[in-house]
Image (cartoon, rainbow, N blue to C red):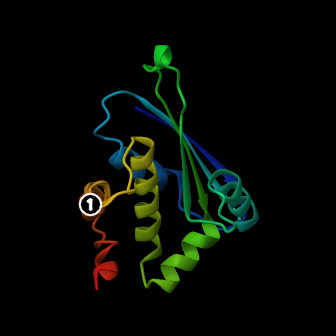
Amino acid sequence: MLELDLQLATEAPAPSEEQFRQWCTLALRQRTADSELTIRLVDEPEGRELNHTWRQKDYATNVLSFPADVPDELLDIPLLGDLVICVEVVEREAKDQGKELEAHWAHLVIHGCLHLLGYDHIDDEEAEEMEALERTLLAELGHRDPYADDEN
């Protein structure tokens, strides 16, 4: 079971809680345990501040993933962590990249959830594994390959 805490720290329009729940459930289905996570939707100033504080990057990014730092003796609790998504960046990227807005939202939520599960894209091998899973999950939703244009 998924326990989702959706926090709206912006006035900008965003997908419904039902959509977020669908995307998270899909991304987390390989996890057999219950899952608890927070998704916080923010404006650019908060997104920029968090990206600067945690990644030393002075701009708002699309999604930040904060996996729960759970002590070993408590590893059986369902807390996965937090996702922070900057709504304006998501909208701008979708427009600039010619992507369907809902598909871009789905991709970023799935991408963030996979980070909470321990997937990464630091080296090529890890990136290929993570991107392949993202492609598969998005195809199940009827969305095209989000990396198709990157390969040209």
Q: Quadrant of the C terminus?
A: bottom left
Tell me residue 13's x, y (percent).
63, 67
Q: Is residue 24 above or below residue 31?
A: below
| Image-quadrant location for residue 137 | bottom left
Q: Amino acid at mark 1?
A: Glu
Q: Position of residue 87 (x, y in %)?
A: 61, 66
Q: Residue visible at 32% across and 73% down? A: 147
Apparent side of residue 1 relative to residue 63 in the rendered image (left or right): left
Q: Looking at the picture, does residue 85 appear above or below residue 79?
A: below
Between 85 and 51, the one lying in front of the other is: 51
Q: Up-down: is 72 above or below 45?
A: above
**Residue beneath the point at 39% across and 51% down:** 120
Q: Please count the marks in the image.
A: 1
Of 60 and 1, the residue lying toward us: 60
Q: Residue furthest front?
A: 123
Q: Image quarter for residue 30?
A: top left
- Residue 107 place in picture, x, y as percent: 40, 63
Horizontal side of residue 97 vs 81, given as left or right: left
Looking at the image, residue 10 lies above or below residue 69 = below
Q: Position of residue 95 (x, y in %)?
A: 51, 83
At 26% from the left and 55% from the top, the residue drawn is 129
Q: Could you say whether the residue bearing mark 1 is in a helix, strand or loop?
A: helix
Residue 91 vs residue 48: left or right? Answer: left
Q: How many neighbours does mark 1 have within 10 angstroms: few (below 14), some (14-19), or many (20 or more)?
A: few
| Residue that protrudes farthest toward the top in the picture | 73
Which residue occupies the foreground of this view, 117 or 121?
121
Q: What residue is disc 1 on? A: 128
Quarter that holds the N terminus: top left
